[in-house]
Amino acid sequence: MKRTTLGRVGLSAAVVLSLTASACGASNGSSPAGTASGAGPAASTGPSSAATASAGGAPSASTGPSSAATASAGGAPSAPAAGQPLSGSVSGAGSSAQTAAMQAWVAGFQSSNPNVTVNYDSVGSGSGVSQFTSGGVDFAGSDKALTTAELATGKTRCKSAALDIPTYVSPIAIVYNLPGVKDLQLAPKTSAGIFAGKITTWNDPAIKADNPNANLPSTKITPVHRSDKSGTTNNFTDYLSKTAPSQWTGGATEVWPVSGGEAAKGTSGVVAAIKQGNGAIGYADDSQAGGLSKAKVKVGNTYVAPSANGAAATLADSKPVSGRPNGDLSIAINRTTAAAGAYPVLLVSYEIFCTTYSDAAKGGLVKGLLTYIVSSAGQQAAAKSAGSAPLPSSLATQAKASVDMIGSAG
């Protein structure tokens, strides 16, 4: 998320609807995502630098600078009667790639639940997971699924299973600033060579081979990477390691493994650094590319631009990770897919939650929010706001079933 520019944003609902019983846990079976709420507003109101006051007049609490939304709270969490809107507050932290999507989700959810405060702190996936497993927030957003060790830590925190469900599918764009070059094409080995620091000028023979008709300058290449622990970095390095292992030997990792280049914090920091640097290149969630030029990547014999459809085609050619807890929907992305139109530089971002909460009302709030997020309305709101690929109906159905486990014995 763009923590440096968004600040805390006040989200209020223009339409008030009742949250149906299915949003509190009972599925009506009529749709993959249940009937949590109507679509509601698809985008947040404008940015505000000050914290939004709650209904009682006091500023809402947050664990740090937040780029997502805070709406007016209706008091302490309480278990609502069936068919009544939820009230209380719920907190999350993590993925900065989910910025626009989270704003749309919170706005849509609050259209049915105006007395719920949702605080989401865009500290990056790694920090969000750490806050969740330590009990600092109620849920986390992460661009990578929990590791085996994190699953164990999460189980200790939750006193039940901690689960990952996919909620946001988006291309990662390879973005660059090179005046005069608008249609850059990069084979996997070329991209890996650039980010490994082995290809250092824009007129390198490898880049020329990918772009035979381009007028490439001798400008020095400045690779820009995330300075913080990042799920986007994990996905990007996973792509490099799977498609060009001879050039990229750093593996898939949340922490950038190569010295050199320029480091920037968060997605917004990477984008800002590239905008300011002639010859710079980096990676960012496509929704936050900020008008920068985007490279096409080579898939088979074709160069493919980042798109939601391309990300969806890769997801359809990927498989679930085996050996996970019941209800966990982690996905092993097929980076070497040859599917028509597939764009393999993507992230599948997850919401991470407990199947039981010591505060039942808090669990109800998490359940209600996540029910909306995986609903058809929630997925369409994210697609409209962030350009993401909606979950396939079969996967949305599975995600709803996992959310319905909240409140079970785990």
Image: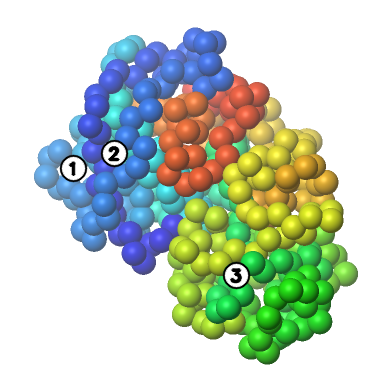
- Do labels 1 and 2 touch, CB within 8 Å? yes
Q: Which mark is residue 54?
A: 1
Q: Is residue 398 left or right of residue 244?
A: left
Q: Is residue 123 visible?
A: no
What is the secondary structure assignment of the residue under circle 2?
strand
The type of residue carrying mark 3 is: Lys
Say above or below: 37 vs 325. Answer: above
Q: CA distance from mark 3 to mark 2?
A: 43 Å
Q: Is residue 300 left or right of residue 117?
A: right
The type of residue carrying mark 2 is: Thr
Query: Sequence order check: which comes first, mark 1 or mark 2?
Result: 1
Q: CA distance from mark 1 to mark 2?
A: 8 Å
At x 47%, y 33%, the residue is 380
Name the foreground residue: 378 vs 297.
297
What is the secondary structure assignment of the residue under circle 3?
loop
Residue tagged 3: 182
Q: Is residue 74 visible?
A: yes
At x 65%, y 51%, the residue is 346
What is the secondary structure assignment of the residue under circle 1?
loop
Q: Residues within 10 Å of mark 2 (few under 14, many from 20)?
A: many
Q: CA distance from mark 1 to mark 3?
A: 47 Å
Q: Is residue 234 left or right of residue 44?
A: right
The type of residue carrying mark 1 is: Ser
Residue 323: x %, y % from top left: 78, 35
At x 78%, y 70%, the residue is 210
Q: Which mark is residue 117?
A: 2
Residue 72: x %, y % from top left: 21, 39
Q: Residues within 10 Å of mark 3 (few under 14, many from 20)?
A: some
In front: label 1 or label 3: 3
Q: Quadrant of residue 350?
A: top right
Task: Tell me the quarter of the image containing the C terminus.
Answer: top right
